[in-house]
Structure formats: C-alpha cells, structure tokens
Image (cartoon, rainbow, N blue to C red):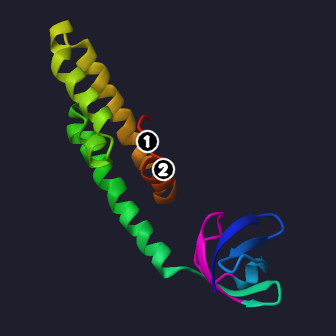
Amino acid sequence: MKGTILDYNDVDRVGIISGDDGQRYNFDIQEWKAATLPKAGTKVDFSAVEQQASAIYVDASASAGLSQAGSKKIAAALFAFFLGAFGAHKFYLGYTKQGVIMLLLFLFGFILLGIPSMIIGIIAFVEFVLYLVKSDEEFEQTYVVGHKPWF
C-alpha cells in the first residue's frame, strides 16, 4: 500500500502514515527500511496489518522526483551564480516576472552609477547560497511547489 508520513517523533521513534485508502497507520522505527530517518511528507510504500504499518520503504516514484528536484536545484544555483544578475535562475524556475525585474534593474542600473546593478548582483549571490544550503526536499517545497519567488 502507498501512503504519506504525517508525523514522526524522534524521541519515541514512532510515527503515523496516512494510507492512500484514507486510513491512518502507526509505525515503529524497526519497520523503517530506508537509510535516512522518516520525515513528515515522505511518500512511502508499506504493508498494513490492522492499524500497524510494517516493511516501510520510501516510494520509488517519489525518490525519482527528488532526484529531478536535486538536479533542478543545482542548475538553478549555477544560473544564480554565473548569470544571476540577469535573472537567469528566475527564468529557469519559471518566475518570469521576477526575472524581467532583475534583468531590467541590472541593465538600467548603470544609469544610476551601477548601484542598482550591484544590489541585484548581491541578491543573486544570496539566492545562490540559499539554493545550495537547502536540502533537495526543502528546495522543491519552497521554490518548485510553493512558488516562492524571492529568497
């Protein structure tokens, strides 16, 4: 059966899975079969006996999506570092309006002694660092799913 982890308590090492059948299943860490600890929001595949989940694995289709998010994160970070002042990373992530704002401020910023252009460059560098610091899951939730255009 497939489902999503609703909650996991690190102290008690127990959690709750919401199954795709609409039922909730309790689980213990001994049933977790992945290398990393369970985390709320993780898609899982498990066996259910009454209201207990057993043999819990991270869903293969969900992990494939994470690897794509990871590659999107690295590409966006590289765009932010090398072409960030032009808003390339914004265009790459689908934020056209914000990309145009960055591009125009950078180009027309030279009229005002380059100060707006320097500010846009600093913003791009800060976003580069933020992209690298976030985990793949956080990056996907924040910038791909959550559509957060700035910082």
Residue 4: image x %, image y %?
Answer: 64, 71
Please name the amino acid that badge 2 sits on. Answer: Lys
Residue 124 relative to residue 12: left or right: left
Please name the amino acid that badge 1 sits on. Answer: Leu
Local SS, label 2 = loop
Residue 129 relative to residue 115: left or right: right
Residue 25: image x %, image y %?
Answer: 77, 78
Q: Nearer the viewer, residue 90 or 12?
A: 90
Q: Residue at x 82, y 89 (%)?
A: 50
Give the class, few, some or many, for how many residues have Cα within 10 Å of label 1's Cα (few <14, many ≥20).
some
Q: CA distance from mark 1 to mark 2?
A: 6 Å
Checking the image for residue 134, the label placed there is: 2
Question: Is-magenta flag for residue 147?
Answer: no
Q: Which residues are magenta?
A: 32-47
On screen, 13 above or below 109? below
Residue at the front extreme of this rendering:
22
Disc 1 to disc 2: CB gap under 8 Å: yes
On screen, 37 above or below 131? below
Checking the image for residue 143, the label placed there is: none
Q: Residue at x 77, y 79 (%)?
A: 27
On screen, 127 above or below 51? above
> Residue 122 occupies which quadrant of the picture?
top left
The residue labelled by disc 1 is 130
Residue 41: image x %, image y %?
Answer: 62, 64
> Residue 65 occupies which quadrant of the picture?
bottom left
Residue at the top extreme of this rendering:
112
Q: Residue at x 74, y 66 (%)?
A: 8
Quadrant (top left, top right, bottom left, bottom right) of the N terminus: bottom right
